[in-house]
Image: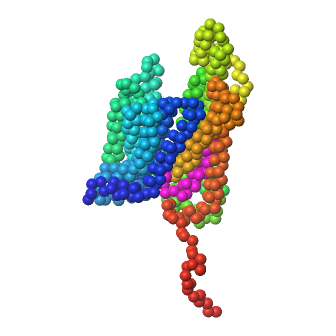
Amino acid sequence: MNYLPIADRELRVAVRKRSTFWLRVAAALTGLVIGGGCLVLSKLFGANSVSLGSVLFSTLTWLCLVAGLSAGLFFTADCLSEEKREGTLGLLFLTDLRGYDVALGKLLATSLRCFYALLAVLPILAITLLMGGVTGAQYWKATLALVNALFVSLSAGLAVSVVSRDSQKALTATFFVLLMFALGGPLADGIIAGARHRTLQPQCSLSSPAYVLMEASAWGRSAYWSALAVTQLIGWALLVLACALVPYTWQDRKRAGAGTTRSWAYVWRYGGARRRQRLRWKLIGREPVAWLASRERWQSRGLWTMAIVSVGGLVVGLMRAPGMEVWMIWSYMGVLFTLLLYLWAASQAGRFFVEARRSGLLELLLTTPLNDRQIVRGQWRGLLRMFGLPVALLLGVHVTASTLSQLGFQRIATQVSKAASTTITNQSGTLTSQTYSVSTTVVLPTKAGTNAAPGWSGLPVRIPPLQVSMAVATAAAAALSTVANLLALLWFGMWMGLTSRSASLATLKTILFVQVIPWFVIAFGTGMVVGLMLSGLVFRASPVQPASFFAWWPLLSALLTAVLAVAKDIGFIVWSRNRLRCCLREQAALNPGQPRFAAPLPLSVSGPQPPIIATVQ
């Protein structure tokens, strides 16, 4: 037997897949588009080549870091758990294979496409060396940091997949493990430094792949090599753990009473007896598919927990009236929660059809009097029944925090505008003192009782109505685009679940086609259009002043992004809904990945036909 036979076979299969080639092409094209966008925007605002090189380098490296950390979610988080569900993992251990053969084979097979995509971006990243602002040491350190982040992500996903059996649980656990490694260490060091009133000392941050990339651009002595060594130890430890556990976790060992309706696992997943009976009486007669789609409740409990914590934090923040800096940080944290919500929507929408096809439930549903529209409508209503209210609460908190954050941005823009006007109009010898007095107003928080409203230490007494309207409009536009994105993810995820082989692949396709690719296009187009408008090149108007630029940029960007996002989402919703209603039975008859049957040739082309024998009366 060859050394690592599964790795040899999986690599031979992976290099022959068309996705391996097209993923490299897509990664290179994405890098070219981002580089061209940064070049156009930087030249539009008059940036030199040195600053352009550093900006482009930072943009590409951090986007590659996010993509590398996401690889474990979609490529290795369900690679072994899928084999467990299909019952094929135990067959491998009937041979002379060991745990490291299976684990390394899966790791190499799933990492090949990701590694090739990263290699396709590196030549574009090297162009920044010719622009200036980036040294050769920074480039090679950043390259090593990106490969390190990819390895840690894939190893973490593989370790979670070894101990998991459900695809959605594996995806959720991998997400939180990667989030802990990427942000947990820096946040812990920041909290310790704030509690002890000292500068940040990297201790827990050494375990973060993001911190390794951050230290790659540091000048002088840094903790780059220490952080790289620590993260490598973590990645290899996770890989060794996966190799050691895979021979013992493939069996489905059930405890006594685990399959009964009174076990804690069954109650946690489906609820108590009263809840199950009430839901069955209410839905099984009218919407049987909605009853099937809304039986499990452990996913909704997670969203309810997140919604309650967010509402509680918002209420506490409104009662204690913190400064605008807190609401701005809250707004940035809301982006993380929004991404988590998008990931949940994409995974949950396609999960029902994937599992129904695998278990044979979909074929049973098609033999009932239910038509295609009733099946699709039942799943949609089941999703709304389980997750509609907590998602609405999360969106309400997000809108409120975004409005307060935009008010903070408008306040800063107003103070900068006042500082600029004072500096320009004052021509006496007291220019320094006037500028210093205004700048202290911008940096330091205002005191309650002097020029602040009662109970609001961060807001000025009078906020211009235009600024309030701009802040509310920006928050409303962001909320509208978020709602449209969620609806598009749910509808397109249902179609991907019907046409994909696994839940992780359906989730990846949904996120990629609905969010990632359109986000790059919309962000590039919005930046170009808003930049041209504010610079006065579109309507041949006078350029906007820098202070007013910061005030108008969030509003125009949010409104234009919302319009484009809603138009994109309407297209995905209409297309996916029509495909689900008209092609459900046709797709259910095909295996995922199976080509469609060719249409029969016309009689004139297909050759002579056999004679028709008349029936005898």
Q: What type of secondary structure mainly makes up the magenta span?
A: helix
| Residue 447 is one of the magenta-drawn residues | no
Q: From the viewer's perspective, is 382 left or right of 268? A: right
Q: Nearer the viewer, residue 320 or 464?
A: 464
Q: From the viewer's perspective, is 28 left or right of 540? A: left
One can see residue 55 in this view: no
Q: Residue 253 location, x and y as percent?
A: 38, 52
Quarter holding the C terminus is: bottom right
Q: Nearer the viewer, residue 392 or 519?
A: 519
Q: Nearer the viewer, residue 198 or 42?
A: 42
| Residue 488 is one of the magenta-drawn residues | yes
Q: How many marks?
A: 0
Residue lying farthest top? 429
Q: Nearer the viewer, residue 333 or 604?
A: 604
One can see residue 326 in this view: yes
Q: Residue at x 36, y 50 (%)?
A: 108
Q: From the viewer's perspective, is 5 left or right of 362? A: left
Q: Residue 124 location, x and y as percent?
A: 45, 42
Give residue 399's quadrant in the image.
top right
Q: Residue at x 33, y 34 (%)?
A: 229
Q: Residue at x 71, y 35 (%)?
A: 539
Q: Residue 180 location, x and y as percent?
A: 44, 35
148 in relation to 410, above or below = below
Give residue 320's quadrant in the image.
top right
Give residue 182's quadrant in the image.
top left
Residue lying farthest bottom? 617
Residue lying farthest right? 465
Q: Residue at x 63, y 62 (%)?
A: 582
Q: Which residues are magenta?
A: 476-505
Q: Residue 349 location, x and y as percent?
A: 57, 50
